[in-house]
Amino acid sequence: MVKTIIDENLPRDVEEWLSKKGFETVTIPKLLLKSAKDPVIAEYAVKNKMAIITLDKGFAQLYRTFQKGHNSL
C-alpha cells in the first residue's frame, strides 16, 4: 500500500480515521516539513513515492510537475 502524507490543512481526525482503516499515513510535522512550501512537500512525496491528501487547490498540478521531472531521471 502507498504511504500517504496528510497535509497540515486537514483535521487530525483524518489521519486517525485512515490509520484505523489500515492506511499507512504520516503527517507533515512527523516528516519534519512543518510549514514547508507546497513545492517542497510535493517533491518529497514524489521522491518517496507517496500520495498526498490536501485541501490546497492546484496541488495536483504541482505534484504532476515534479513527477514528470522525477521520471525523466
Image: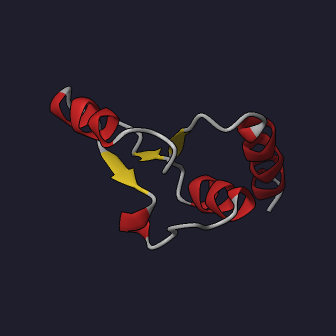
Instruction: Answer with the quarter of the image where residue 47 lies.
Output: bottom right
**Residue 25 left/right relative to 9:** left
Residue at 62 percent of width and 67 percent of height: 36
Quarter the N terminus occupies = top left
Q: Is residue 41 above or below residue 61?
A: below
Residue at 45 percent of width and 39 percent of height: 10
Residue nearest the observer in this picture, 33 or 72: 33
Quarter the C terminus occupies = bottom right
**Residue 60 left/right relative to 68:** left
- In the picture as drawn, the residue positioned furthest to the bottom comes out as 32
What is the tally of numbered marks visible in this picture?
0
**Residue 13 left/right relative to 9:** left
Residue nearest the observer in this picture, 9 or 66: 9
**Residue 2 left/right relative to 66:** left
Residue at 50 percent of width and 47 percent of height: 7
- In the picture as drawn, the residue positioned furthest to the left comes out as 20
Instruction: Answer with the quarter of the image where residue 13 lies.
Output: top left
List x then y, in percent, for residue 65: 83, 47
Residue at 52 percent of width and 41 percent of height: 51
- Which colour assignment does the render follow? secondary structure
List x then y, in percent, for residue 17: 23, 30
List x then y, in percent, for residue 46: 63, 53
